[in-house]
């Protein structure tokens, strides 16, 4: 399986839970820090992935998986 991108913030419990699950399942992933407090979830690029502007978001290729 190819790598997935995990968009979130390290301090977020849901992001940490997803990251822990990915590590447990030995799925290669890259954590992409989102500046939640600075409006990072309200950018047009992020809203295209998740219109609810929440983290975490997993992205595999062009396919986003959101909560």
Image (cartoon, rainbow, N blue to C red):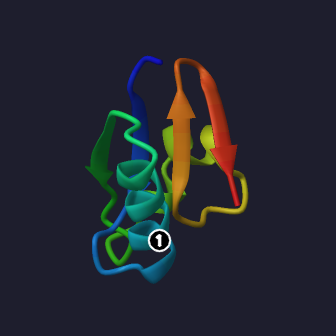
Q: Secondary structure at mark 1?
A: helix
Quick one: label 1, few (<14), some, or many (20+) residues within 10 Å?
few
Residue 45's x, y, as percent?
51, 38
Residue 63's x, y, as percent?
65, 26
Q: Residue at x 44, y 67 (%)?
A: 15
Taking depth in this image into account, of 2 and 40 the one nearest to the observer is: 2
Figure quadrant of the C terminus: bottom right
Q: Residue at x 37, y 40 (%)?
A: 26
Taking depth in this image into account, of 33 and 42 the one nearest to the observer is: 33
Residue linked to disc 1 = 17
Residue 36's x, y, as percent?
39, 71
Q: Residue at x 29, y 49 (%)?
A: 31
Q: Residue at x 35, y 78 (%)?
A: 37
Taking depth in this image into account, of 3 and 64 the one nearest to the observer is: 3
User: Could you say which quadrant of the image residue 64 lies in?
Assistant: top right
Residue 33, above or below 64: below
Residue 40, above or below 25: below
User: Could you say which quadrant of the image residue 20 lies in?
Assistant: bottom left
Count of marks, rendered view: 1
């Amino acid at each position: 399986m190819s790598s997935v991108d995990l968009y979130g913030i390290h301090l977020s419990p849901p992001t940490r839970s997803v990251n822990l699950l990915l590590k447990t399942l030995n799925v290669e992933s890259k954590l992409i820090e989102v500046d939640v407090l600075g409006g990072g979830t309200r950018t047009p690029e992020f809203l295209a992935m998740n219109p609810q502007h929440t983290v975490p978001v997993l992205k595999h290729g062009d396919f986003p998986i959101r909560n």
